[in-house]
Amino acid sequence: MSERGIGMKTVAAVDLGASSGRVMVGRVGRDTLQMREAHRFENRPVRIGGTLHWDVLALYQGIVDGLRAARQVDSVGVDSWAVDYGLLDADGALLGNPVHYRDARTEGVAERVWKLMPAEALYGVTGIQYVPFNTLYQLVAARGSEALGAARQALLIPDLMGYWLTGVAGTEVTNASTTQLLDAVSRTWSAEVAERVGVDVGLFPPLRQPGSRIGDLLPAVLEQTGLRGPVPVTAVASHDTASAVVAVPAVTGGRFAYISTGTWSLVGLELERPVLTEASRLANFTNEAGIDGTVRYLRNIMGLWLLQECVREWNTDLLALLAAAAEQPLLRSVIDAADPGFLAPGHMADRIREACRTAGQPVPGTPPEVTRCILDSLALAHRRAIQDAQRLADHPVDTVHVVGGGVRNALLCQLTADACGLPVVAGPAEAAALGNVLVQARALGVVGELGAVRDLLIRTQPLTRYEPTGDRAAWDAAAARLAATSS
C-alpha cells in the first residue's frame, strides 16, 4: 500500500524548552513514525532592571524561521514549559516580555496566599504541589503593577504563540492545570480559589482540549513562512511534560512509572483520578492534567539542571566527564536533589560541596566526583518519588520508563534501575516533540487512541532496557542517611 493510501501526514512540532527551542518535522503513518529537526534556536532569558524575562519575540521569530525550514506541513502544534504567561491589552498587544519563573519576584508570596487560603485547602481543590513560581503566586506578585492593571487577557506561553500564529486565543488544559487555579476534578477554573486569593481567572480565555483545532495560520504567517494555506494549528498537550508522557512507550495495561528527564526530573504515575489527600500534599506531589482525562501524578525534582550548571561552569566535555564519573565510588556523597536551595543558577558545584560538608559527608572535590554525587543523588530522588507515588496512590508498578534528554545518560539510567530495583526502559529521547507530533497525527485521523499511539512508539522507536544490578542494601543505607540529614 502506498504512503498516501495509509494516510501519511507531515506535521510541525514546535517544542520550546528552557534553554532552546526547535521545530521538528514528524511524518506519521500506520507503521511509520519519523522525525527530523528543521530548525533549532536559542532561548536566552534577559535580565532588565533587576527582573528576569523570557525573550518571547525572539522565540516567535525562531518558530517562523523553523516553519519556513520545515516546508509544507499538514498541521502545526506548540508545546512549552509551564506556569509562565504573557499579558495582552485590549488591542491584543503584548504588555512587556513575560517574567521568567526563576525570577525572585515570588519569594515569600506563597505565605501571603496561604493566609487567604490555607495550603491544605488550596491543594484539596487544585491538587497542585507547592513550587514558589506557580502561576497563582506570579499573579499575586504582579498585583498592583501597571501591566496587570492594563491587561485584558493572560496567555500561557504556548497559547501566546498559538495566538500570534492564528489570531485565536484559548487556554489548553494540560498547561492550565499547572497554574494552581484549575479544579483538579472538574478541570474548570476554580471560582473558589480565584475569589479567596484575589486572582481574576477571567483573564484567561476559554479552555480547550488536546487535539482541538485552534485555527489556521494567518495570511501574514503564511507569507513569512512560504507555506500554502490553509494550515491548521492544533492544540497539543501543550505542557511539554504532558506531551512527553504521551510518548511513554508503555504496553497497554502495563503498570509503569515514568521519569521525564531534562532540566527537571518529573517522576510519577499516570492515573485515572487525582490524589488529593493531605499525605499527598505533604509529600509534595502534584496532580496535573494529562491527555484523555488522565492525571499526571508526579513530583518535581531539580533534575539534570544540577549537572548542566556545573558543566557550564567547568566548560568541559560531558561525555568524558560521565565516563570519569562512572569510575567513582558508589554513593560516597549524596544530596537532596529536590532541595529548593539548588533552584537558582550559579556556583552550583560549590553549593553541592557545601551541602555535603553540612551533612557531614565526604566533600566531592573534582568534577567527576561532583558529577557522581549528582547522579547518585538523582537516582535516589527517583527511587523515593516512585516509592512514595505507589504508596500514596495505591498503584504498584513493575517498570520505570525514562523519556527525554536523560535517556542519553546511560549512567543515570542504570543508577536509577539499581536504586529502584526495577527495570528501566529508556527512550525516546525526543519525547516531548514526539508527543506533540502524535497528538497532531491523532487529530488528523492517522492514529487512534492512546494505546495505539504507544504501540506505534514501541514498534518504531529505539528503546534500551536496563536491569537492576548491584547491592540493594547500599541504596537502602544511602536513602536512610539522606533522610536523616534532610529531616
Image (cartoon, helix red, strand yellow):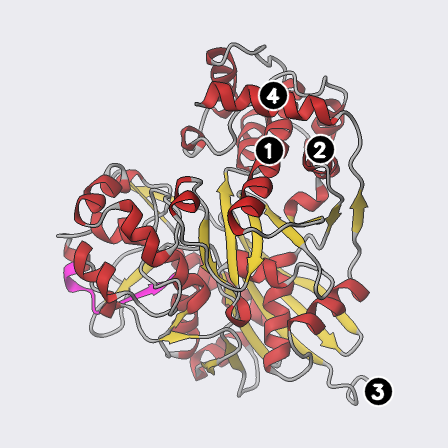
Magenta span of residues: 149-156
Disc with the residue nearer the chain's start (3 vs 1): 3
Label 2 SS: helix
123 on left or right of 235: left
Looking at the figure, which quarter contains the N terminus? bottom right
Amino acid under disc 2 = Leu
Residue count near mark 4 (Cα–Cα under 10 Å), binned few <14, some 14–19, many ≥20:
many
Amino acid under disc 4 = Val
Q: CA distance from mark 4 to mark 1?
A: 12 Å
Looking at the figure, which quarter contains the C terminus? top left
Camera-near label (3 vs 4) is 4
Q: CA distance from mark 3 to mark 4?
A: 53 Å
Q: CA distance from mark 1 to mark 2?
A: 9 Å
Label 3 SS: loop
Which residue is identified by label 3? Answer: 2
Camera-near label (4 vs 1) is 1
Disc with the residue nearer the chain's start (3 vs 4): 3
- Relative to 380, residue 118 above or below: below
Which residue is identified by label 2? Answer: 415
**Foreground: 449 or 370?**
449
